[in-house]
Image (cartoon, helix red, strand yellow):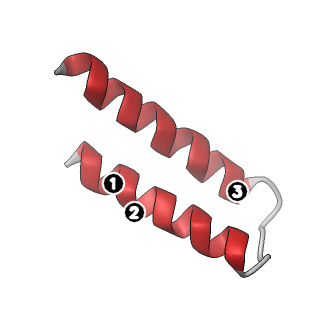
């Protein structure tokens, strides 16, 4: 579940980066959330 959410957030971030469409710092917040979720997933294994 968390892994799926992280992948979706990373894809959204990449799409925002490629299209140069940023809503302030929202895209970067998505990236930070995705990284945190991935780290939590790795730590809990």
Q: Is residue 22 left or right of residue 8?
A: right
* Residue 21 x, y percent position in the rendering: 77, 77
Secondary structure found at label 1: helix
Q: Which residue in the rendered view is the most extreme toward the bottom?
A: 19
Label 1 near label 2: C-beta < 8 Å? yes
The image quadrant of residue 7 is bottom left
11 relative to 29, above or below:
below
Residue under the point 53% across and 68% down: 12
Mark 2 Cα-neighbour bin, 10 Å: few <14, some 14–19, many ≥20: some
Q: Which residue in the rendered view is the most extreme toward the right?
A: 24
* Residue 4 x, y percent position in the rendering: 27, 56
Q: Residue 5 has which mark? A: 1
Residue under the point 60% across and 75% down: 15
Of mark 1 and mark 3, the one earlier in the sequence is 1
Comparing marks 3 and 2, which lies closer to the viewer? 2
Distance (Cα) linking label 2 and label 1: 5 Å
Of mark 3 and mark 2, the one earlier in the sequence is 2
Residue under the point 26% across and 44% down: 2
Q: Which residue is mark 2?
A: 8
Mark 3 Cα-neighbour bin, 10 Å: few <14, some 14–19, many ≥20: few
Q: Which residue is mark 3?
A: 26
Q: Residue 41 has which mark? A: none
Secondary structure found at label 3: helix
Residue under the point 47% across and 32% down: 36
Where the C terminus falls, by quadrant?
top left
* Residue 23 x, y percent position in the rendering: 78, 67
* Residue 1 x, y percent position in the rendering: 19, 49
Distance (Cα) linking label 3 and label 2: 15 Å
Q: Is residue 37 left or right of residue 26?
A: left
Mark 1 Cα-neighbour bin, 10 Å: few <14, some 14–19, many ≥20: some
Distance (Cα) linking label 1 and label 3: 16 Å
36 relative to 9, above or below:
above
């Amino acid at each position: 579940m968390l892994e799926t959410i992280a992948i979706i957030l990373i894809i959204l971030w990449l799409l925002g980066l490629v299209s140069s469409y940023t809503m302030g710092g929202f895209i970067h917040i998505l990236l930070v959330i995705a990284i945190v979720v991935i780290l939590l997933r790795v730590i809990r294994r």
